[in-house]
Amino acid sequence: MSTEVHSVRFYQPEPSEVKCLASDDDNDQLAVARADNSIEIWNISTTPHVVRTILDTYGTVESLAWFEKRLFSVGLQGSVIEYDMLLQNPKTMHPLTSGSGWCVAVHKNNKQLAAGTEDGYINVFDISSDEIIYNRLLDKQEGRVQCLAWDHKGEFIVTGSVDTVRVWQVSTGHAIHRMTTGRSMNNLETRVWAIAVAKDFTIITGDSRGKLCFWDGKMGISIASYQSHKADVLSVCVSKKGNSVHCAGVDPLIASYERVKMRGSEERRKWVKSIHRVIHEHDVRSLVLVDGKLFSAGVDGYLAMSSYPPKMLVKYPPLLQSPSAYSASRAKCLLLRYPQSLVLWKLGGSEPSKLLEWQPRNNNRIRTAALASNAKWMAVSTQERFGLFSLVIKEKPTIAKCKIDTKDNLSASCLSFSHDASTLGVATIDGDIYIIGLDQNPEIKFRYRPLKDKKLTAMISHLVLSNDGLYTVAADLNCNIIIWAKGEVYSKLPTYTCSITAMSIQPSTNNLIVVYADHKIVEYSLMKRKYTSFSRRIHDNLPAQWLNRSYPVHTITFDSRNDDIVMLGDDSTIMVINKKKELPVPEAKIPRISSGGKDSNVDDGSENSNQHHPMHQSPTTAFHVIKKYKHLVHFGELAEGEIVAVEISPLKLLEKLPSNFRQKKFGRM
């Protein structure tokens, strides 16, 4: 059976540059602050993926810091902000003395937070169980505190500013060392943009001269200085052992330095150049080293994960948290989500036609949306409001808001329509689930409170409804999966160790498919309340090449003509599974079927390149891949025998970026 694929390439959301990164090493979390003042929380324990997006930060985010799963930021609004990870919004605000906040750092053992301000103050706070408490101010310095870091023991704070690096004794509030950087040939002032402190109190700084400098924090003297870059060094990070340093900046080269023993001496060590890699084409704003993997990000918006050795590079594009596109399989319509608007398109004709565009009040950012399979209903939620709309698709499309009789706030983290468009599921930001019947007058049929009833233990990350709306399945960020039917808990799946990246119910069989961050796949029969025979067969027999992929699965699609076909989509590849065919041996290469046209190579690491999937016109085993895409955000059924693939061109993203640092290459610009 042939399948027609509609490729949609007109979805072009604006990329948002990354301003800073912060890692919570103990809990495998990475916070990514973007220029649109949103903060993404990434789970990096296996395959990195976004699990939360904080849309409202009450201002800019200039610096981030973690303390035991708690996230803090400072910005131009002049406060330290702590975020509520369940509600995904600011929880508390503590004013700084004085001016805008530019940098923040936490010392975990001392349970203290330090923040530097525009007017030269260093604010120190004690971190209690539910808030931060003002402790003291250190002596005022001249000019902005551009960056700061704690020493290993928490007795000293090291800061960088114009022409100067200072070492502060926290107990007295006084600077005990003041080290000057020197200036460039034209006597321009030197700004120390980035600072890090090794375990032995070696201070590493990056400045506007393009220099990486090493200082002895105990003696307050310079150790070494390297012209590592041709422009400003904006970020520096040091390994936990203190024997390797990475730096990058406006000149996007990521330079590495290693500390080696001097010949003939066990005590003397010297910093030497190691590998240099060009991973980004624009300014690199922030670097974070986690378990030997270097995360880098900046103006291009991509989050890059790299290492050497072994040589590895994966780049995650600056896209909205999935899902951001929704197809209506019974109406050939496609809904595209942008940060502050929704656009509905009609597909299937000679060319796509735009039906309508919707924007929330006050230009609020949209958290999630959903489109019914018949395109007669659209649901949308911002951080503050939920809306259900009835759609009439005619020559002149109309949209009307529907009233739901409730005083509860239905602002949602997840929305899902049943396949027959008779029911809507709403998972609210505070953890409740509402099941709404979509008759002429929509009304709430059931309300579940899984957090209060302790059925779930974290924010709801996925919500799906069966074909007729009978079954409701919800998953949380702690990998719990609960199933409800007719208003009561129906079943619970075993809790797995990895987070869930995709979940869907096959309309024709009521089988639940779940894909985890480590690419494990399970299939659960809702009617029989047990794993299917296929799920048990593949439990320990998934291809190694599949398990080692670098991108998470975000889309699950079924073929309405064949119940045995399941299609899994990630950023670049569609994995097609035929449940009736024999499973390959785990070591076997997964074959690739040509999807027509010229396949594109994927620059995301060697294991994902086309050459590692041999061509085969008729695979005999259960797995094969279709490799055609870059930045595939949606792959869903548009009609029987028709699929819509929504992808975003990397070149289109780059076209929207500012010009990058120009330098001569091979005698030319």
Image (cartoon, rainbow, N blue to C red):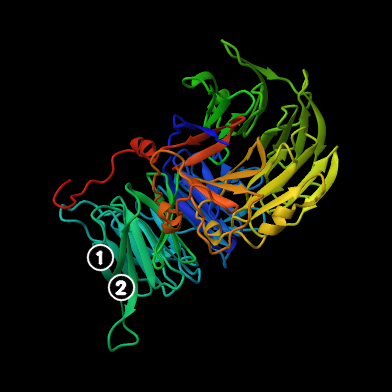
Quadrant (top left, top right, bottom left, bottom right) of the C terminus: top left
Kindly give the residue lying farthest to the left in the view shown: 667
**First in residue order: circle 2 vs circle 1:** 1
Kindly give the residue lying farthest to the bottom in the view shown: 264
Name which residue type carries label 2.
Trp
Determine the image quadrant of residue 184: bottom left
Q: As drawn, is 614 to the left or to the right of 587?
A: left
Name which residue type carries label 1.
Tyr
Residue found 57% across the figure and 43% down from its top: 53
Residue 218 position, x and y percent, is 38, 74
Instruction: Name the mark on residue 226.
Output: 1
Residue 422 position, x and y percent, is 75, 27
Residue found 72% across the figure and 58% down from its top: 536
Height in image: 659 above or below 166? above
Let me know if residue 75 appears in the view: no
The residue that label 2 is drawn on is 271
Please tell me whether mark 1 sits on a helix, a strand or a loop. strand
Q: As drawn, is 402 to the left or to the right of 181?
A: right
Height in image: 87 above or below 369? below
Looking at the picture, tell me which residue is in the foreground, 257 or 178: 257
Residue found 68% across the figure and 34% down from its top: 416
Quadrant (top left, top right, bottom left, bottom right) of the N terminus: top right
User: Is disc 2 in contact with disc 1, using a CB cutoff of under 8 Å?
Assistant: yes
Residue 373 position, x and y percent, is 66, 27
Residue found 38% across the figure and 70% down from its top: 244
Q: As drawn, is 342 to the left or to the right of 128?
A: left
